[in-house]
């Protein structure tokens, strides 16, 4: 694959991921995603899967469930959370949620609200000067995917040092995990 083709594919995937992350509660039809990607819907599904490692449908489901799990800490009703997260019915939301977290949304909400002893750390806002950031995103079990992401990042940084004499891991480099 030519470098320019690969770059086009990566940019298209980044555009779609950004769009999904920002609009996960809205309609994310195949046509809309294809328009954002600027590719045909059938071809882009294959490109997305080969780059991200999961289908677009699975990625959308993960984002919606992740965001809804955060909202279950509030007093908002589960049906409202489900609808705002892009699910058409409470039942479809509950089924997807239980498959992902092995708990119903109601059980999850109850457990999260009952947790005692959690210490809320006071946030500290720090302004940084403009900085170049490299990001690697892996999905799945954190203990596995974090190691994979680190390996990809280190291989890339090493290749840049050898190929372009650009040291990405110098003394001023910082590493963040999310």
Image (cartoon, rainbow, N blue to C red):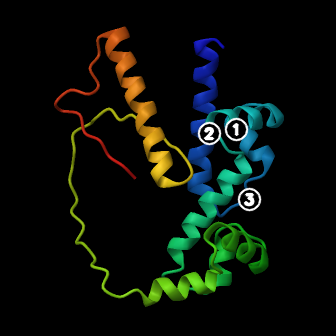
Q: Secondary structure at mark 2?
A: helix
Mark 1 or mark 3: whose residue is earlier in sequence: 3
Residue at image x 83%, y 35%?
A: 42
Q: Secondary structure at mark 3?
A: loop
Describe residue 54's horizontal placement relative to residue 141 as left or right: right
Quarter of the figure that contains the N terminus: top right
Residue at image x 46%, y 31%?
A: 152
Q: Nearer the viewer, residue 3 or 104?
A: 104
Q: Quadrant of residue 37?
A: top right
Describe residue 96's horizontal placement relative to residue 128 as left or right: right
Q: Quadrant of residue 63?
A: bottom right
Q: Residues within 10 Å of mark 2 (few under 14, many from 20)?
A: some
Describe residue 155's horizontal placement relative to residue 128 as left or right: right
Tell us which disc is closer to us: 1 or 3: 1
Describe residue 26's horizontal placement relative to residue 22 as left or right: right
Residue 175 position, x and y percent, is 29, 41
Q: Residues within 10 Å of mark 1 (few under 14, many from 20)?
A: some
Query: Gap between marks 1 and 2, in whole Å?
Result: 5 Å
Residue at image x 64%, y 27%?
A: 9
Q: Residue furthest front?
A: 144
Question: Would you place residue 59 above or below residue 164 in this image?
Answer: below
Q: Is residue 75 visible?
A: no
Answer whether labels 1 and 2 touch (C-beta < 8 Å).
yes
Report the disc number at residue 52: 2
Report the disc number at residue 27: 3
């Amino acid at each position: 694959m030519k470098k320019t083709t690969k770059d086009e594919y990566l940019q298209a995937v980044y555009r779609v991921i950004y769009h999904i992350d920002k609009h996960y509660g809205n309609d994310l039809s195949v046509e809309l995603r294809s328009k954002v990607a600027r590719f045909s819907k059938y071809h882009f599904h294959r490109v997305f899967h080969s780059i991200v490692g999961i289908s677009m449908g699975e990625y959308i489901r993960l984002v919606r469930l992740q965001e809804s799990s955060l909202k279950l800490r509030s007093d908002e009703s589960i049906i409202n959370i489900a609808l705002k997260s892009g699910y058409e019915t409470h039942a479809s939301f509950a089924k997807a949620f239980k498959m992902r977290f092995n708990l119903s949304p109601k059980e999850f909400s109850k457990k999260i609200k009952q947790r005692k002893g959690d210490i809320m750390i006071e946030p500290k806002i720090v302004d940084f000067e403009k900085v170049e950031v490299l990001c690697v995103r892996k999905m799945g079990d954190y203990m596995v995917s974090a190691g994979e992401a680190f390996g990809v990042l280190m291989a890339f940084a090493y290749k840049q040092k050898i190929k372009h004499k650009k040291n990405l891991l110098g003394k001023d480099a910082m590493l963040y995990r999310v």
